Image: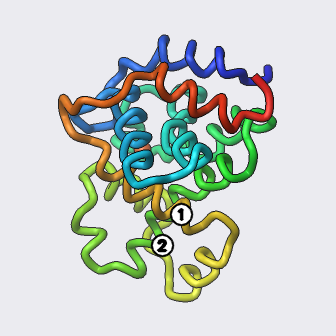
């Protein structure tokens, strides 16, 4: 089934209230906080949309809450992108696809980064293959949209603040509309 903007809304309505793996926010709050941080940083509609939807794969491919506790990598970055293919351009899809590798990249190039990760992010990092080597990191960052994925990752890591006020989902529906390839 092809995803639509209405389908995205329906997915958040159905599953957005769930707790975001081991963090004090729901999936919806995490998505809105990520998008808000992108917007406040002056990102364009594509990267704000990618930030809003980067964890859609946790909801579209439902493996329950905190799969890392069971030693499972849900590979949500790929499920999210396959759900959104055709609806958004690569400037949205690729940062989503790369946001997990961006964590592996940041662990390789920024010594303080690993220590700043939450317990669940550290646990999933190991399931996702651990920090990149210097060679892997160089190869990663040379890809198109890799720098956007790294920015998204920084917002993702910060978007876990309990009770933070954000714009509502309707606000970001406008942003999604601005860069969607179809409705
Ligand atoms: Fe996230």
Quadrant occupied by the C terminus: top right
Residue 57 image position (x, y, % from top left)? 57, 35
Q: Which residue is mark 1?
A: 101
Mark 2 lies on a secondary structure that is: helix
Q: Which residue is mark 2?
A: 105
Q: Which residue is painted at 65% across and 17% down in the image?
A: 7
Which residue is at the front of the view, 28 or 38?
A: 38
- Disc 1: residue Cβ within 8 A of ligand 1's nearest atom: no
Is residue 175 positioned above or below 102 on the image?
A: above
Residue 141 placement, left or right of 42: right
Residue 45 image position (x, y, % from top left)? 58, 43
Quadrant occupied by the N terminus: top right
Residue farthest toward the bottom in the current orientation of the protein:
135
Q: Which residue is painted at 46% across and 17% down in the image?
A: 15
Q: Residue 164, located in which quarter of the rendered image?
A: top left
Mark 1 lies on a secondary structure that is: helix
- Disc 2: residue Cβ within 8 A of ligand 1's nearest atom: no
Q: Which residue is painted at 64% across and 80% down in the image?
A: 139
The number of numbered badges drawn on the structure is 2
**Picture quarter with ligand 1:** top left
Residue 34 image position (x, y, % from top left)? 40, 43
Q: Residue 113, located in which quarter of the rendered image?
A: bottom left
Whether tag 1 and tag 2 are in contact, CB under 8 A, the answer is: yes
Is residue 49 positioned above or below 17 on the image?
A: below
Is residue 48 positioned above or below 129 on the image?
A: above
Residue farthest toward the left in the current orientation of the protein:
163
How far, Cα to Cα, is label 1 from label 2?
6 Å
Tell me if mark 1 has few (under 14), some (14-19) or many (20+) residues whose alpha carbon lies within 10 angstroms of its own.
many
Is residue 84 positioned above or below 126 on the image?
A: above
Residue 162 placement, left or right of 32: left
Which residue is at the front of the view, 54 or 119?
A: 54
């Amino acid at each position: 089934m092809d995803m639509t903007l209405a389908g995205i809304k329906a997915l958040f309505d159905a599953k957005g209230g769930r707790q975001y793996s081991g963090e004090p926010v729901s999936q919806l709050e995490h998505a809105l906080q990520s998008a808000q941080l992108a917007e406040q940083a002056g990102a364009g509609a594509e990267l704000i949309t990618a930030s809003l939807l980067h964890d859609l794969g946790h909801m579209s491919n439902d493996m329950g809450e905190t799969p890392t506790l069971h030693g499972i990598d849900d590979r949500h970055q790929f499920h999210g992108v396959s759900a959104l293919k055709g609806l958004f351009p690569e400037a949205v899809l690729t940062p989503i696809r790369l946001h997990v590798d961006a964590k592996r990249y940041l662990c390789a190039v920024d010594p303080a980064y690993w220590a700043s990760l939450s317990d669940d992010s550290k646990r999933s990092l190991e399931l996702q293959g651990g920090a990149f080597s210097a060679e892997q990191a160089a190869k990663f960052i040379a890809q198109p949209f890799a720098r956007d994925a790294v920015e998204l990752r920084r917002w993702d890591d910060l978007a876990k603040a309990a009770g933070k006020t954000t714009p509502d989902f309707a606000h970001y529906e406008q942003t999604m509309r601005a860069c969607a390839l179809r409705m």
